[in-house]
Image (tube, rainbow, N blue to C red):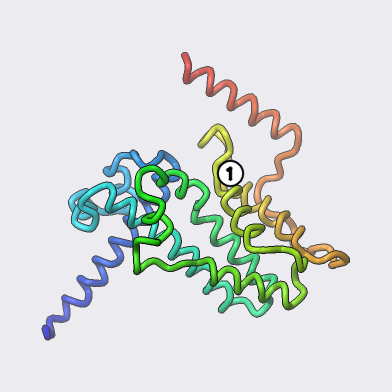
Amino acid sequence: MSTDPARPRMRADARRNREEILRAAREVFADQGPDAPLDEIARRAGVGIATLYRRFPTRPDLLRGVAAEVFTAVDAAARRAAGAEGDPAGALRRFMHDALDLKIGSVVPALLGHITAGELFGRERGDAADPVETVDRLLARARAAGAIRPDVVFGDIVLMIIRLSRPLPGGGRIPDDDALAHRQLDLYVDGLRPSGSARPATPLGGPAVDAAAFTRIRERVIDDARADVD
């Protein structure tokens, strides 16, 4: 076995490069779709295009890597939340906010049709984490503690995350879209509490889009759409 002290460092660098490439690819595919330029992914990851191709020789290789990474990341988020929060309701809230940042609602539809459903959801990969059981245990813990309604089930958690992680129409024209999604998630999580629970004391974060703000956003989207046509 080699005693060269540089070798472990290089392995760590390679692992970090792979993680950054997958993170950047997830973001770019969510924003621009699976045909987005690989140069843009390399730029966001802070690596050269040659490094990207060393890790993922073809685009399908990268798509499969993103699929594995996003579900592994959801599983890891649930495990972190369970370990970091003694309060079951707090753990569930933390998980949902962390999972929202993974943009699974944008990434998964972007990958469908470019890789098989088995590749996407892990049936053809032995190394991908399956977050279903992990998330369901987190949910069961919150139910058992009486922290959420007893009729809340897995789909009420994951499908809402998927819905909220899809960008609003208008793409980048909607300011603070991500922060707005987190605000709306807090409203949803508060609604999971059992009947008769005390009102939440934590103020809502994110932008408060009142009627006037909504009108301004709507006009901006309309104006931008007209400019694109012209």
How many callouts does the rendering have?
1
Relative placement, left or right, of 153 versus 29 is: right
At x 54%, y 71%, the residue is: 133
Q: Nearer the viewer, residue 156 or 33?
A: 156
The answer to whether 11 is drawn above or below residue 1 in the figure is: above
The answer to whether 143 is drawn above or below residue 115 in the figure is: below
At x 75%, y 68%, the residue is: 148
Q: Quadrant of residue 161?
A: bottom right
At x 83%, y 63%, the residue is: 199
Q: Amino acid at mark 1?
A: Asp
Q: Residues within 10 Å of mark 1 (few under 14, many from 20)?
A: few
Q: Nearer the viewer, residue 28 or 138?
A: 138
Relative placement, left or right, of 109 versus 219 is: left
Q: Quadrant of residue 149?
A: bottom right
Residue 146, image x, y percentages: 77, 74
Residue 67, image x, y percentages: 39, 56
- Screen quadrant of the N terminus: bottom left
Q: Of all residues shown, which one is farthest toward the right?
A: 196
Residue 145, image x, y percentages: 74, 77
The answer to whether 185 is drawn above or below residue 40 in the figure is: below
Residue 17, image x, y percentages: 28, 61
Relative placement, left or right, of 146 versus 60 is: right
Q: Nearer the viewer, residue 27 or 193?
A: 193
Q: Secondary structure at mark 1?
A: loop
At x 41%, y 52%, the residue is: 117
The residue indicated by pointer 1 is: 176
